[in-house]
């Protein structure tokens, strides 16, 4: 595989410093040993990772957490597929790693000659990867039509530059009526000879949802010579407006590039109204493509520079920094420059004192990405948590899987609770504790009204009465999205996990009765344990165990089996271990689950041939699935069974699934979830009890990682993790220390991290007794 098509040359620190108006430290480029000399960390990022084999990432231009993700669409339902050869357009909205069609709003494409088709599948332009480049903040491609397209972005705008052949028919097609989701209605307006305004109302993500609207305004750097619109198959020269329902609808503008071959344009979007798009354009537009591209790269360099990894191979560093990059792509800014945003009540609100964020894949991100952002981007994480609280304030209920301004109800359980309790435990909710707790308590103890969009804890009535969510096969869905009744067993485990985390918050806020009640409910995982099989099983509405007896063929678990959900009891691993027969039985079951004997012989082969069975192959398996959320914490279970070295063995084998190729993402990235798993596991600090402040430890893959931390939340301002000599063979922790003091536990708390500058590991080639004492394991929640 040739990677020369995406590696960009190093720029100068002086140019970046001049652009930002201040000094910027120049990061160093990796030498052969993985250390650094002068160069850029952004050069280590490959945005094409995950664009093949259903990783569902996108290679286009964005800035950290930006509203705009300006990227090519090739025909894949989520946008870009590396195996495709034609680009249908460059659209402004993409979500990294989702599993269903979402975004793709307003694809634009440069063409030449007469306009003979209004269907982007027909006018799609052929391209070659040899003529394609991508790096953080920029994307460019040479089309077979002879046109070069370059994309960059600010927070709320996408900037495009097209270099045409010499012609008097250089067109830019602005397609309002085709996207990656279902369009409900669209409108295009040509305001003057430089400006086009659009409004796109769409719905859908896996299933139909309430509609939402994206407003956009595109301003070109020079007048067009002519323009027009289309509706359906009809192109109307000179027309300035066109409105449509679900049919094709758009506008074209034409330039004479006989002398000046370049055309630049800036597209600003808003989820509020046309005024918001215009304000965003006025605030962030008006700059040349080159200036915007330099600023975008500088923003990414600044973000990546907070994590300086030394040691490891070049491939390891590329996969690591590419994962770090993807971890900062979402959630996304949802408020305009004036602070206005559209709430889930579809009314306009104004964010005061914080930035409003949207796009919440909570079932995924509560396990890894939320914690990584709380560590590396706590200021933004605080605003994200406040935004989730505002969703409850505006619409009456907390979200489950939110896209833009609407709830989709995709996935199951109660993921918002560990997301918000994590924010609380990391100290990000100061001033909002009471409001957050009220919303969480309402969510945990009730069900949303029938006339509202969210499903919340859909099976809560039965769960509160009987201690479990029933599995009711083929039950009609009352609301769009997934249903907890379809996945009663896993919903029960997820509810119990969330109860445990909320109980901790209640206890710390002084709500003793609530704390006791939630702690008791956190034990409800026991209600679906079938002692006759030794595994969790679904129970029907009558309370009877149901579905196949074979735990590898189980029903009632969302994207998994009983084997894979066995370990999703982070609140009480000692209790779960006792249920299945004690520590020895648990370790034997874990060894079988991870194919541990085969793993020791060939970790990479075991990961690829025993564990992984396809990007969406969730069922009928008794082995670890490292590419899906239910198993993300599972390798760290060994920390609680007295064999912490096996955690490292499994984690390091799973890390081999991440490569610097387009197929190098294991499963959907799910808004940074898998990428964050890679980053945290590579550093050796992982959130083993999501929703708390507990971080499990394993052997880092780098000899040294320097983390720059926000002093407002981490007074020391940094944390250095050292593991001199770590390698594939020398991967076992012999001893650990914090600031020079011996440390024998297999976990840290956030307070420990705040008080520590140096976490050091001594490693060797054989397992040791480190972390095996009775008090070494992460504690169960009480």
Image: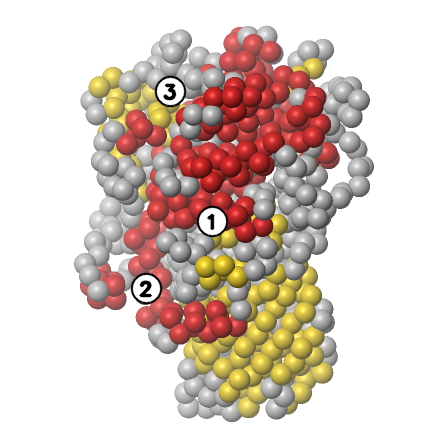
Disc 3 designates what residue?
Answer: 746
Q: Which residue is mark 2?
A: 295
Of labels 2 and 1, earlier in sequence is 2
| In-image side of 461 versus 18 (left or right) | right
Q: Secondary structure at mark 3?
A: loop
Q: 7 and 61: which one is in front?
A: 61
Q: Is residue 324 above or below residue 85?
A: above
State the residue in front, 714 or 733.
714
- Graded by Cα atoms within 10 Å as few (under 14), some (14 to 19) or many (20 or more), the crowding at tag 3 reads many
Quadrant of residue 732 within the rendered picture: top left
Q: SS of the residue at dot 2?
A: helix
The answer to whether residue 36 is above or below residue 109 is above
Q: CA distance from mark 2 to mark 1?
A: 27 Å
Q: Identify the residue at horizontal 25%, vertical 17% (top origin).
A: 742
Question: Which structural element holds mark 1?
Answer: helix
Q: CA distance from mark 3 to mark 1?
A: 34 Å
Residue 184 lies, in percent from the top left, at 69, 66
Q: Crowding near pointer 1: few (<14 within 10 Å), some, many (20+)?
A: many
User: Which quarter of the picture shows residue 702?
Assistant: top left
Marker disc for residue 279 = none
Name the side, left or right, on which 117 lies relative to 191.
right
N-term-proximal mark, 3 vs 1: 1
């Amino acid at each position: 595989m040739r990677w020369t098509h995406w590696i960009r040359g190093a720029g100068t620190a002086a140019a970046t410093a001049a652009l930002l108006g201040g000094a910027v430290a120049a990061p160093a480029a990796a030498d052969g040993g993985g250390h650094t000399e002068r160069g850029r960390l952004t050069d280590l990022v490959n945005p094409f990772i995950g664009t093949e084999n259903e990783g569902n990432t996108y290679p286009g231009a964005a800035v950290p957490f930006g509203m705009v993700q300006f990227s090519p669409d090739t025909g894949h339902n989520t946008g870009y597929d590396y195996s495709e050869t034609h680009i249908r357009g460059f659209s402004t909205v993409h979500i990294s790693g989702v599993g269903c069609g979402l975004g793709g709003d307003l694809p634009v494409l440069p063409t030449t000659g007469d306009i003979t088709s209004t269907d982007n599948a027909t006018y799609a332009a052929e391209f070659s990867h040899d003529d394609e480049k991508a790096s953080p903040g920029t994307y460019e491609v040479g089309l077979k039509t002879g046109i070069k397209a370059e994309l960059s972005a600010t927070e709320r705008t996408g900037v495009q530059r097209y270099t045409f052949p010499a012609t008097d028919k250089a067109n830019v097609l602005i397609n309002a009526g085709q996207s990656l989701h279902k369009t409900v209605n669209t409108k295009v307006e040509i305001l003057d000879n430089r400006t086009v305004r659009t409004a796109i109302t769409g719905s859908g993500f896996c299933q139909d949802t309430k509609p939402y609207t994206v407003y956009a305004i595109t301003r070109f750097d020079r007048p067009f010579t002519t323009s027009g619109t289309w509706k359906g198959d009809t192109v109307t020269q000179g027309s300035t407006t066109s409105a449509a329902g679900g049919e094709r609808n758009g506008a074209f503008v034409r330039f004479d590039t006989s002398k000046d071959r370049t055309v630049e344009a800036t597209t600003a979007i808003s989820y509020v109204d046309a005024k918001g798009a215009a304000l965003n354009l006025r605030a962030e537009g008006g700059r040349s493509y080159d200036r915007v591209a330099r600023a975008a790269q500088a923003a990414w360099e600044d973000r990546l520079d907070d994590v300086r990894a030394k040691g490891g191979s070049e491939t390891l560093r590329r996969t690591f920094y590419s994962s770090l990059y993807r971890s900062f792509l979402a959630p996304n800014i949802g408020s305009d420059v004036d602070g206005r945003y559209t709430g889930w009540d579809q009314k306009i609100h104004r964010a005061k004192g914080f930035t409003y964020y949207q796009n919440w894949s909570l079932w995924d991100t509560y396990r890894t990405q939320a914690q990584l952002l709380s560590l590396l981007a706590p200021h933004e994480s605080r605003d994200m948590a406040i935004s989730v609280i505002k969703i409850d304030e505006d619409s009456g209920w907390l979200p489950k899987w939110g896209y833009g301004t609407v709830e989709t109800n995709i996935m199951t359980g109660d993921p918002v609770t560990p997301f918000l309790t994590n924010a609380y435990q990391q100290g990000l909710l100061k001033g909002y504790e009471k409001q957050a707790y009220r919303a969480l308590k309402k969510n945990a103890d009730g069900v949303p009204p029938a006339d509202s969009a969210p499903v919340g804890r859909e099976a809560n009535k039965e769960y509160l009465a009987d201690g479990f969510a029933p599995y009711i096969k083929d039950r009609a869905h009352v609301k769009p999205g997934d249903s907890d009744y379809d996945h009663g067993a896993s919903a029960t485990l997820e509810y119990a996990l969330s109860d445990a985390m909320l109980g901790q918050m209640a206890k710390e806020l002084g709500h003793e009765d609530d704390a006791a009640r939630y702690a008791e409910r956190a034990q409800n995982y026991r209600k679906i344990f079938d002692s006759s099989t030794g595994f969790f099983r679904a129970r029907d509405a009558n309370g009877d165990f149901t579905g196949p007896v074979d735990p590898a063929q189980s029903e009632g678990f969302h994207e998994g089996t009983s084997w894979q959900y066995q370990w999703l009891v982070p609140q009480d691993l000692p209790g779960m271990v006792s249920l299945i027969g004690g520590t020895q039985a648990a370790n034997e079951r874990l060894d079988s689950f991870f194919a541990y004997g085969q793993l020791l012989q060939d970790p990479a082969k075991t990961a690829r041939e025993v564990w992984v069975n396809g990007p969406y192959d969730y069922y009928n398996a008794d082995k670890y699935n490292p590419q899906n959320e239910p198993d993300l914490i599972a390798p760290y279970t060994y920390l609680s069974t007295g064999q912490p070295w096996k955690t490292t063995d499994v984690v390091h084998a799973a890390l081999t699934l991440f490569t610097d190729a387009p197929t190098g993402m294991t499963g959907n990235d799910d808004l940074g979830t898998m990428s964050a798993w890679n980053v945290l596991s590579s550093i050796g600090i992982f959130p083993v009890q999501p929703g708390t402040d507990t971080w499990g430890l394993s052997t880092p893959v780098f000899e040294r990682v320097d983390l720059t931390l926000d002093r407002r939340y981490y007074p020391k301002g940094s944390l250095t993790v050292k593991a001199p000599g770590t390698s594939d063979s020398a991967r076992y922790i012999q001893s650990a220390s914090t600031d020079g003091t011996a440390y024998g536990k297999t976990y840290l708390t956030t307070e420990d991290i705040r008080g520590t500058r140096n976490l050091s590991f001594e490693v060797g080639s054989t397992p040791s007794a480190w972390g095996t004492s009775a008090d070494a394991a992460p504690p169960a929640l009480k």
